[in-house]
Amino acid sequence: METDRDILFWLKGIGTKFDFKLKLTYKNISLWWFCEPTLTRLVGNLIRNKKYESSQNMFIKYVTKLPRFYYFYFLARTLVRFVLGKLLTSKPQGDKSACKILAVSYIAFWRDYPVAGRGDKHIDRDAILGNVITTLRNRNFNVVALDQDSSLLTDFRTRIKKRQFGKPVESYLTLGAVKNAIKAGRRSEKEWDRLKCNNEFVDSLCYSGIPLFALLKDDLAKTFCRNTFIATLSIELVRRAIKTEEPDLLLITFEDGTLGKAAVFAGKLEGIPTLAIQHGNISPYHIGYLHTKEEVSDEIAPENFPLPDKTAVYGPWVKRVLIKHGYYPAYSVVVTGQAKYDMLARADESFRRENFCKRHGLDPDKKIVLVCTQPSIAEKRIIFLKSILRVPKEFPKVQIVIKPHPQEKRNWHKGVVKEQGAEALVLPRSSNTYEAIYACDAMLAFVSTTITEALILNKFVVVVNLTGRPDLMPYVESGAALGAHREEDIIPAIRDVLYNEEVRKRLTEVRKEFIYQHTYIQDGKASERVVDLITQMAEESRRR
């Protein structure tokens, strides 16, 4: 079956043939890089006849059919966040003469975490950058933390919680930024009007014998215009932030997202060094990190994809992937481990299985199988969940606990459980995933960092991949987890990880090397290693 990787490189060929990189240019950087991932997913979903859509995607699809409505919708959200930034942002803290770091993240990464050794005490922080920012401030760095809200409507509650931590990137909005974004969107509209009349282009949109133009033309039009508009506005917001704050370094997570990518590009334009922090799984199939050799260069030009100056990654395996499949220069990829995993080294101080069971009405003497779901496998997730809900019938002494992804609706899982007449606990989306992993005996998931986290906590894992496509991460291939690639494989795999001592021994033996390759040294000091790298880069920036 075709993968998103295959589709991406097919689109790259079309983009090169019709010179999209040059035609969609802003400040000598191509906005085509913001369109490629969206178009890849659109084509992939169409080919696979994927039916599921999130509420946000449905809103964008149907409401934005109104002429230019999306501009007004996005600008309204931007203005709301601009006002919130002015009203709810605390005054800057720290020594003004100290190195200044501009940290760029997303409000969706805001999480509730337990404090090690403090019982039930919890703190709110950014899941990816929180530990790093805390360590930076402890070392007397001046940190300005920015975020963007990608929810359908503005997340007021989280914004209020974060008022002591940072501010919206929209706080730097100017009329000039809005004008530039609208101009870029309109230029793209004109380019699309010419392109849709080009018969050669129309004929080229045929993948695996499937003519795509008629099916995709509305989505293509919106992608060209909407993505270039948002990309330009995001670049301008970060450029304005850089000029206002005058940082020594840009610290960025989710650099393959719109704001993250815009931050890298803005840093290049303004001559500020950029450090990207790996935020999730990266594999040879991750379309956000796949490039051709010709695309990668330090020179600012439309045909070049601006990479971060440095990228801090989980482990040696990811470094090899970026060098081989993304053509990242070897010197630019630094293995530090993941700062958010520092707390896993002290998990015994933070969590108690008996507390988890008592809070959720579970029997601590029975085994717990944790199921972590994801919206990315929407076309197969109902089969996945229904199959797992048969487990209590097969194993009466096993309890099923379901942890929805933060982007999923909990009511959907509850509905499936009720429909099946099954016994299963559905946790709130906001519940602490690490605590649930710590308490379980085995975990099931498709492709998620929760699998890596379970392995770090010495749990047995079954990777359930019913898509017919290759596993995106080598959990099963390495021998660190069992795989279930057909519905009928799920129950036997669960039996093996729970009761088959030979299988459990084999998985345990492989686990240690896998953890090193994919998450480096689990010593609770990844934050320190990241901050050491930041210190080195910031000091070099100051000497220039």
Image: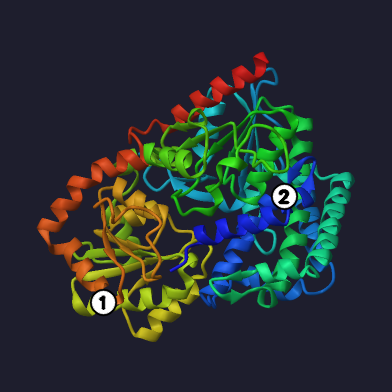
- The residue at the far front in this view is 200
Q: Position of residue 514 (x, y in %)?
A: 29, 44
- The residue at the far left in this view is 502
The residue that disc 2 covers is 21
Q: Amino acid at mark 2?
A: Lys
Residue 424 to residue 158: above or below: below
- Residue 110 vs residue 320, the one in the foreground: 320
Q: Earlier in the sequence, mark 1 or mark 2?
A: 2
- Disc 1, SS: helix
- Residue 101 vs residue 301, the one in the foreground: 301
Where residue 397 sits, quadrant-wise, is bottom left
Q: Amino acid at mark 1?
A: Glu
Where residue 307 sits, quadrant-wise, is top right
Q: Position of residue 516 (x, y in %)?
A: 31, 38
* Image position of 292 (left or right of 190): left
Q: Is residue 349 visible?
A: no
Where residue 317 sits, quadrant-wise, is top left
Residue 343 to residue 357: above or below: above
Residue found at x 46% / y 54%: 285
Q: Residues within 10 Å of mark 2 (few under 14, many from 20)?
A: many
The residue that disc 1 covers is 488
Residue found at x 66% / y 41%: 304
* Image position of 361 (left or right of 223): left
